[in-house]
Image (cartoon, rainbow, N blue to C red):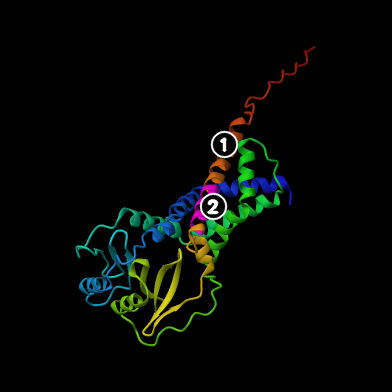
Amino acid sequence: MNKQLLLKLHRWISLTFALPLLVIIVTGLILSFEPMAQVAAVRPGSVDPARVVALIKQFDPDGKARGVAIDASTQHVTLQGAPGAEIDITTGATADKPATSSVFLWARRTHEHLIGIPGLTAISTAAMLVVMIMGILMGLPRLRNTLSGWHKGAAWFTLPLILLSPITGLFLQFGLTFAGRAPPAAAKRISLPEAVGIVARDHDLSSVSSIGNRGGRMMARIVESDELRAYAVTPDGLSALPRNWPRLLHEGNWSLIGSAANVLISVVLLALLITGVLIWTQRRLRRPKRTRELPVKPAAASPTAS
C-alpha cells in the first residue's frame, strides 16, 4: 500500500479516536498500579475470619449479596450487590469507601465502559491496533532528535509491549481466555459466609481480594507470590482454576513485573498519542496559507467604433 496513504489513514484514525483513546490510556495507567496495591495490602494475620463472617451475616441477613471484597490495608470489607455495604472491620459500622479503592473502581468502570456507549471501548481498542499495524507497514523509521523522530522511536522500541495491550484488551472484550475447561461447579450451593470459612481454612484472609458468585460458581481471587490466582470454592475446599492469560497480561496481575510493565506501556501509549496530535498541529500551523484573491486580469480593450 502507498506509504502516503498509510500515513494519512494512521493520522486521521488516531485523531478521530483521540478522546476515547485518551480516556482508555489514562484509566489504564491508573489501573496499572492496582496489582501493586493488592500485593502491598497483604498483612498476614490482620483479618479475622470469624469477624468477617459475623459482619456478612449482620449486614446481609437474607443472603442477597453476591460477593465480598476484603482490603486488609484499610481493614474494610465490601458487600457486593444487593444490599451492598462498605464496612469497617474494626468498628463493625458502615464507612465511606477508601479514596484509593474509589479511584480504582472509577477507573475500571470508565476504562471498560467509557461514557456508556455500547461497543465504543472495543471499537476504540481496535482502532488503536489498526493504527499500530499501519505504523509497522510504513517501515522502519529514521531516528532523529525531533518530535517526529522520538514518536517513531518510542513506538518501534516498545512495539511488542504496546501491541500486547490492545490485543489482550480485544480478547477480553470477546471473551477469549484460552484457559481450557474449568472444573464443574459444585452441585451444592454455598452461601457467602460458608465460602469465607472454606477459604480461611487454607489461606490468610488478608491475601484474599474477593470471594463471590461468578456465573453460578463460587470463586475466590487470592494473591499468591505476587499473582492474583482464581479458585473455585466447593464444600470440599479450593480448586485452582485455569489461568486466564489475556486477563492476567492485560491487567498485569501475573506478577509485580507485569504491573510495572503495564505502567510503562500506558506511559508510552500516552506519549505517542500526545506527540501524534502535536505533530499534526505543527504541520497544520506550518502549512502556507492559500492566496484567497486571484490576480485581476486587465480588461480587454473594446474595439474602437469606426
Residue at x-position 64% and y-position 35%: 145
Which residue was labeled with disc 1? 281
Disc number for residue 80: none
Residue type of the residue flagged with mark 2 = Ile
Which residue was labeled with disc 2? 265
Q: Over which residues does the magenta segment extend? A: 258-269
- Pick the front one: 86 or 222: 222
Image location of residue 153, percent across then percent down:
64, 44
Residue type of the residue flagged with mark 1 = Thr
Which of the 4 quarters of the picture holds residue 60?
Answer: bottom left
Q: Is residue 176 left or right of residue 2?
A: left
- Are discs 1 and 2 less than 8 Å apart at CB? no
Task: Give the residue furthest to the bottom.
Answer: 187
Q: Quadrant of the C terminus?
A: top right
Indicate the secondary structure of the residue bearing disc 1.
helix
- Pick the front one: 264 or 64: 264
- Disc 1 and disc 2: Cα gap in Å? 24 Å
Image location of residue 281, percent across then percent down:
57, 36
- Pick the front one: 147 or 254: 254
Which dot, 1 or 2, sits closer to the camera? 2
